[in-house]
Amino acid sequence: MFTAEWRGIVMSGELVPTLDIYQAVGAAKAVHEVAAPEVKRWWRSKKRAAKAKAKAPWRAVKSRAGEAGGAAKAAAISTAWEMRTGGAGAAGKPKSRGRCTVKGCRRGWLDIKTRVHSSTGKVQEAKVRCAVCRRAD
């Protein structure tokens, strides 16, 4: 119950809440549905950062140990190979060809767009072998 006086008028009555518990629960669920994915995403990023920070020293140690172990293994294999073969080295990889320096060379062919080589006078493409790299052979 309440009583109020305003400009000489006395008002009295009973206060009835316009928001009940069910409406509050519904509003909370609606806010949760909207905010939950954003909050989860934010926490995931925080967890990932914390895990990465915690694992960084171990990763550094593991990489150094792996490099040292790999170098020792390579040295042992090369020593064993030299003992067995009497110093003959392993067959090397064939050297890959470098890129051709001729402008427009594509795998040993040049594409020339010209009117001179066409019988109709319209622009046509003519493929010519590259004389520098001769990859087309």
Image (tube, grey):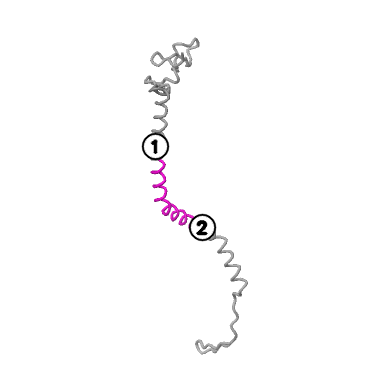
The outermost residue toward the right is 22
Q: Where is 9 relative to 91, above or below? A: below
Q: Where is 56 relative to 73, above or below? A: below
- Which numbered tag is attached to residue 38? 2
Residue drawn at x 51%, y 57% as measured from the top left: 38
Residue drawn at x 58%, y 64% as measured from the top left: 30
Choose the circle earlier in sequence order: 2 or 1.
Answer: 2
Q: Nearer the viewer, mark 2 or mark 1?
A: 1
Q: Which one is nearer the viewer's eye here, 19 or 14?
A: 19
The segment highlighted magenta reads 40-66
Residue 80, image x and y in percent?
41, 29
Q: Residues within 10 Å of mark 2 (few under 14, many from 20)?
A: few
Question: Would you say the magenta stretch is mainly helix, strand or loop?
Answer: helix
State the quadrant of the N terminus: bottom right
| Residue where numbered disc 1 is placed | 72
Residue 90, image x and y in percent?
42, 24
Q: Which one is nearer the viewer's eye here, 61 or 35?
A: 61
Q: Secondary structure at mark 2?
A: helix
For badge 2, the amino acid type reads Glu
Q: Secondary structure at mark 1?
A: helix
For badge 1, the amino acid type reads Ala
Number of numbered discs visible in the structure rendering: 2
Q: Residues within 10 Å of mark 1 (few under 14, many from 20)?
A: few
